[in-house]
Image (cartoon, rainbow, N blue to C red):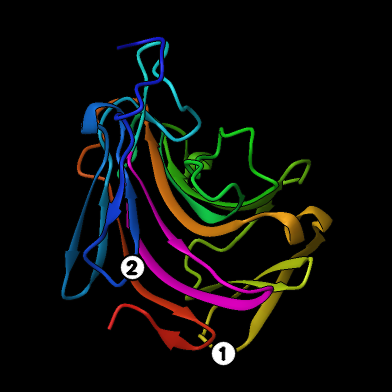
Amino acid sequence: MAGCINTAMFKKGAFAIDDWESWTGWNDAYGSDEAKNDGLYYYLTARQDDTRDEPSDGYAPGLILSKELTGARWQVDLQADFEIPPGQLKRFSYGVWVGGDATRPSIGSASGVLKIIVQRQNGPRPADDSLIVFGLPGGRPFSLPTKLKVLRIAREGNYFSVSYALNRKDFVPVFRLEAPDAAMAPSQKFFLGGFAGGDPQGAYARFRSFKINGRETFK
């Protein structure tokens, strides 16, 4: 199966929390998720790569969870906890993907009009323990406090912005960008995936609150 795209490899289906979608990893073997009473959990699998849509170099595409966002004006507030032991590089990638309706919303997809990517990672060096955000195409990375309480991504027409709060109410702006082609894109999704260079050692992300325009979607 390596080296070609199998049409049945990635399936988009119903998800246990509200109307989230699951885009399975290669052979449904890379990455896993679980809905619990205290949030949505995402677990890494060794050698999964959030930048690939085909397996290569010993890595394979992993599970992506996504939720459709509607309209040209919205605000997403996210609260998440991460357990990422040091060792080989591990990260969780999440954010907003704007592009085709039936396209897998991966970081490496060339068909996306805009990607706002947040990455929480850890690795062998102290500097690897970080939280960054950037926009594609062309955006430079911004460092965020790893202990932030709420991350906010918002859209106002063709403008997208990122901000955060350390206390759930006083938001600090990070950046604002314009994406004129977003108006023509048929789909916009919040997405979640990840990367693990080796044994993830139990690394997981817990998304415990996901609000759209102030409304909690996990309850």
Report the quarter where the C terminus lies: bottom left
Q: Residue 156 location, x and y as percent?
A: 74, 75
Q: CA distance from mark 2 to mark 1?
A: 27 Å
Q: Is residue 218 left or right of residue 29?
A: right
Q: Which residue is label 1 attached to? A: 169
Q: Position of residue 51 (x, y in %)?
A: 50, 31
Horizontal arrangement in the rendering, residue 205 relative to residue 92 (left or right) = left
Q: Nearer the viewer, residue 125 or 174?
A: 174
Q: Nearer the viewer, mark 2 or mark 1?
A: 2
Q: Residue at x 76, y 64 (%)?
A: 175
**Residue type (three-letter) at the residue carrying disc 2:** Asp
Q: Residues within 10 Å of mark 2 (few under 14, many from 20)?
A: few
Q: Amino acid at mark 1?
A: Lys
Identify the mark nearer the N-term, 2 or 1.
2
* Residue drawn 64% across the image and 32% down it: 110
Q: Secondary structure at mark 1?
A: loop
Which residue carries the number 2 mark? 19
Quarter of image, res 145: bottom right
163 with respect to 48 (left or right): right
Predominant SS along the magenta part: strand
Q: Residue at x 29, y 30 (%)?
A: 8
Residue 152 image label:
none
Task: Tell me, yes or no, whether the highlighted magenta stretch contains residue 78.
Answer: yes
**Residue sitting at x 64%, y 82%:** 171
Instruction: State the SS at label 2.
Output: loop
> Quick one: 195 or 128, which is closer to the camera?
195
Magenta residues (range):
63-84
Q: Give percent across and percent down for residue 99.
A: 62, 49
Looking at the image, is 204 positioned above or below residue 219? above
Percent across and percent down for residue 47 are 32, 25
